[in-house]
Image (cartoon, rainbow, N blue to C red):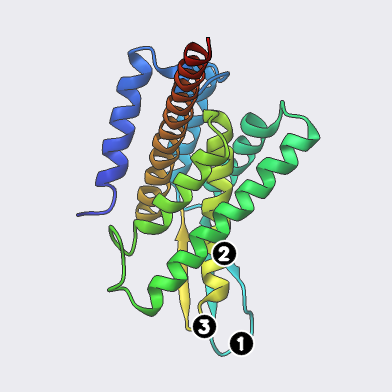
Amino acid sequence: MNPGFISVWIVIMALILFATGWREYLAPGISRRTLIVLGAVSAIMLMMPLWIDIHLRPGAAVTAVIHIHAAIILLLLAGMVTGWGDEGWNNKLYLVLCGVIVGLVWGIVRKLYSYDPVFYWLGPSWDAPILSGALCGICTSNGRQQFGVMIWGAVIGEFVYALLYKGIVMTSIGSVAWWDRFLVSLVAASLASVAHRAVRMTGSKISDLLLNYRGGRSS
C-alpha cells in the first residue's frame, strides 16, 4: 500500500463525520473555526520544506538523525493547549505521564520489531501505533486529550526508537508514512475508548441485574 493512502482515507472519513454532526464526540470543546484554521495552517506548512534536523549522537561513528517538520511542532503546541490547557495540575501531570508511557510503548515496540520483523501481529509498521493508540484510549476517553497525548506520544516514540537503535537510523516525523501511523493511532485510541466504555456499561448492567436477582431471592 502506498504511503499516504491511509491518511487520505482517514481524513475523508473524519470530514464526513464532522459534517454529519459527530464533531462534539470526536473533538469536544473545540470550535469549528479552530479546527479549520489549525488544519489549514498545518496543511500549508506541510507543503513547505520546513524540516529541522536533530542529531541525537553528534560526533559518534553511528549516527541517529531525526527530521521533524515545523508543522509537527505547531501540532505539539496545539495538543498542549487544547488537550491540557483547561485541566488542573493533577490531571495535567496524569496526561503528561500518559504521553510519556504511550511514547515508550511506541518506541520500544518499533525497536523490538527491528530485531525480527517477521514477528508481528498486523504488521511491523502498524503494531506500535495501534498498541499505543489503544493504550491512549484506555487512559482517557476525551477526544481533545487523546489528541494531545497521542501527538506527544508519537513524537516521543520516534525519539525513543532512535535512541534505542544501535545502528545508523534516520527517521522523519511529519513524513507521509509517519502521518499514516499517527492517524491510525488516533483511530485506535477512539475505538479503544468506545470499547472501554462499552465494557464498563455492560459490567455495570450485569452487576445491577445480579443485585436485583439476589434482592428478589432474599425477599
Is 199 placed left or right of 61 in the picture?
A: left
Q: Which mark is residue 183?
A: none
In the rendered view of the protein, which quadrant contains the N terminus? bottom left
Give whichever of 26, 11 is nearer the camera. 26
Q: Amino acid at mark 1?
A: Ala
Q: Position of residue 24 (x, y in %)?
A: 48, 16
Give whichever of 140, 167 is nearer the camera. 140
Q: Is residue 191 above or below residue 115?
A: above
Q: Position of residue 6 (x, y in %)?
A: 27, 44
| Residue 179 in view here | yes
Q: Amino acid at mark 2?
A: Phe
Q: CA distance from mark 1 to mark 3?
A: 11 Å
Q: Which numbered disc, 1 or 2, marks the residue closer to the eye? A: 2
Q: Which mark is residue 60?
A: 1
Give the class, few, some or many, for how many residues have Cα within 10 Å of label 3's Cα (few <14, many ≥20).
few
Q: Position of residue 61 (x, y in %)?
A: 56, 90
Is 77 placed left or right of 30 in the picture?
A: right
Q: Amino acid at mark 3?
A: Lys
**1 and 3 marks in contact (CB < 8 Å):** no
Work out whether mark 1 precedes mark 2 in sequence or the reverse, and give the earlier one.
1
Give the class, few, some or many, for how many residues have Cα within 10 Å of label 1's Cα (few <14, many ≥20).
few
Q: Secondary structure at mark 3?
A: loop
Q: Residue at x 41, y 33 (%)?
A: 195
Q: Position of residue 42 (x, y in %)?
A: 48, 37
Q: Residue at x 26, y 37 (%)?
A: 9
Work out whether mark 3 precedes mark 2 in sequence or the reverse, and give the earlier one.
2
**1 and 2 marks in contact (CB < 8 Å):** no
Q: Residue at x 80, y 35 (%)?
A: 89
Q: Which mark is residue 159?
A: 2
Would you name the residue on which mark 3 appears? Answer: 166
